[in-house]
């Protein structure tokens, strides 16, 4: 039983040391990278790159606007269909309006 607890304790110690070593290695790697200012000096922005980036952003925004407009249009169309069906049901349920509608349709069709 003691060997099992020793193994678990040794694994916990190893995992803790491994986590600390990984954190230290990550910090060293991040410190070795150049800063944002150094990168801007090494690779200056060009107008053509800015133009391409803005074109991509605008293209995505336009696609998003189209998608929103289609969703809104679909919702409006669904509401209108519900209103038409409900009003048609109300008109057909009354005998006088049903006769008027049927006579109107018969008069239209030769």
Image (cartoon, rainbow, N blue to C red):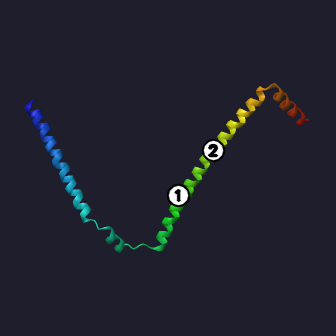
Reading the chain from its start, which is encountered first: label 2 or label 1? 1
Instruction: Looking at this view, name the residue that lies furthest to the right.
Output: 110
Mark 2, secondary structure of its residue: helix
Report the side of 40 relative to 85 (left or right).
left
User: For this rendering, which residue is in front, 33 or 75?
Assistant: 75
Q: Position of residue 10 (x, y in %)?
A: 12, 41
Q: Residue at x 39, y 74 (%)?
A: 44
Q: Quadrant of the N terminus?
A: top left
| Residue linked to disc 1 | 60
Residue 37 vertical position relative to residue 56 in the rendered view, above or below = below
Crowd class of label 2 (few under 14; some 14 to 19; many from 20; radius 10 Å): few
Q: Residue at x 17, y 46 (%)?
A: 16
What is the number of callouts on the image? 2
* Residue beneath the point at 85% across and 31% down: 100
Mark 1: which secondary structure?
Answer: helix
Q: Quadrant of residue 5?
A: top left
> Is 74 in front, or is 49?
74
Residue furthest out toward the left: 2
Left or right: residue 42 compared with residue 21: right
Of residues 86 and 48, the one drawn nearer to the viewer in this rendering: 86
The residue sitting at 14% across, 44% down in the picture is 13
Name the disc covering residue 8, or none. none
Q: Position of residue 2 (x, y in %)?
A: 8, 32
Residue 3 position within the rendered picture, expressed as x and y whole percent measured from the top left: 9, 33
Query: How would you rate the neighbour count of disc 1 (Cα within 10 Å): few for under 14, some for 14-19, many for 20 or more?
Result: few
| Mark 2 touches mark 1? (CB < 8 Å) | no
Quadrant location, the C terminus: top right
Residue bearing the label numbered 2 = 74
């Amino acid at each position: 039983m003691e060997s099992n607890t020793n193994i678990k304790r040794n694994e916990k110690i190893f995992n803790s040391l491994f986590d600390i070593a990984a954190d230290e290695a990550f910090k060293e790697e991040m410190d070795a990278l150049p800063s944002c200012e150094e990168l801007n000096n090494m690779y200056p922005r060009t107008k053509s790159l800015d133009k391409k980036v803005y074109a991509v952003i605008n293209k995505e925004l336009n696609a998003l606007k189209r998608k929103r407009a289609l969703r809104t249009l679909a919702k409006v169309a669904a509401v209108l269909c519900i209103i038409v069906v409900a009003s048609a049901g109300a008109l057909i349920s009354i005998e006088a309006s049903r006769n008027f509608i049927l006579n109107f349709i018969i008069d239209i069709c030769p």
